[in-house]
Image: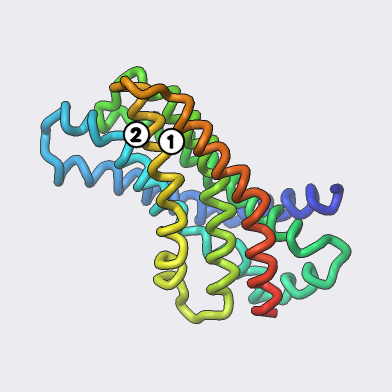
Amino acid sequence: MSAFVELVRRDVGLAWREGGATGTVLAFYLIVVAVLPLGLGPDLKLLSRVAAGVLWVALLLSALLSVDRIFLNDKQDGTLEIMALGPLPLELVVAAKAFAHWLMTGIPLALLAPLLGLMLNLDGAGYGPLFATMIAGTPAVSFIGAIGAALTLGVNRGGLLLSLLILPLYVPVLIFGVSAVSASITGPAPFWPPFLILSAITLASLVLAPIAAAAALRLQL
């Protein structure tokens, strides 16, 4: 467990020192949310209805910007091979790196989302559920993204291929995340069923994604 914690700390420290990746993700999130209302028009009621969906779609697109970096830097400098041969199982290596990605990407995006909700005239009843669903769903975004990052690790300029592989897997997270927020605002459906399904998807990704990504890494290495 100490090796797992140290690996998480290492990746968080590297991401913090680089700085640019998290800043780019947050800036992209802000730009997408700011531009979309220009296309939808000044209708505040329309913006309020689509706010949850816009915030979730923009979050998924923003997270994709940094998913490919989960393994890329370690592959380029040879560190990944050393980790694969180390005492920590490769599945736990993947889990640690995906968890570090969530800490540096998922949490900042979830914290920024309620502030951007003001730009979209999000109903006051939706801010708490929006933050709760994003905290519950963004771990799945990072862990599922790790699968795509592992599969495209050996592909030159594999960003487009990564998007094609991962975006369909993000659809359940998007559906139940938006459904939970919409239910808390408009009803009559309750908030908890879609939220619990979203949480179950996250728990399943925490278990299955490291296994799948580790198998893909073994093929790459």
Residue 218: name its quadrant: bottom right
Tell me: residue 215, above or below residue 41.
Answer: below
Question: So how many labels did they put on this image?
Answer: 2
The answer to whether the residue labelled 1 contacts the one labelled 2, judged by CB atoms less than 8 Å apart, is yes
Q: Which residue is mark 1?
A: 112
Tell me: residue 38, above or below residue 65.
Answer: above
- Residue 22: image x %, image y %? 51, 50
- Residue 105: image x %, image y %? 53, 47
Between 203 and 141, the residue placed more toward the observer is 203
Q: Quadrant of the C terminus?
A: bottom right
Judged from the image, the secondary structure of the residue bearing numbered disc 1 is helix
Residue 74: name its quadrant: bottom right
Q: Which residue is mark 2?
A: 116
Which residue: 34% across, 43% down?
Answer: 30
- Residue 155 at least partly seen: yes
Horizontal side of residue 199 vs 80, given as left or right: left
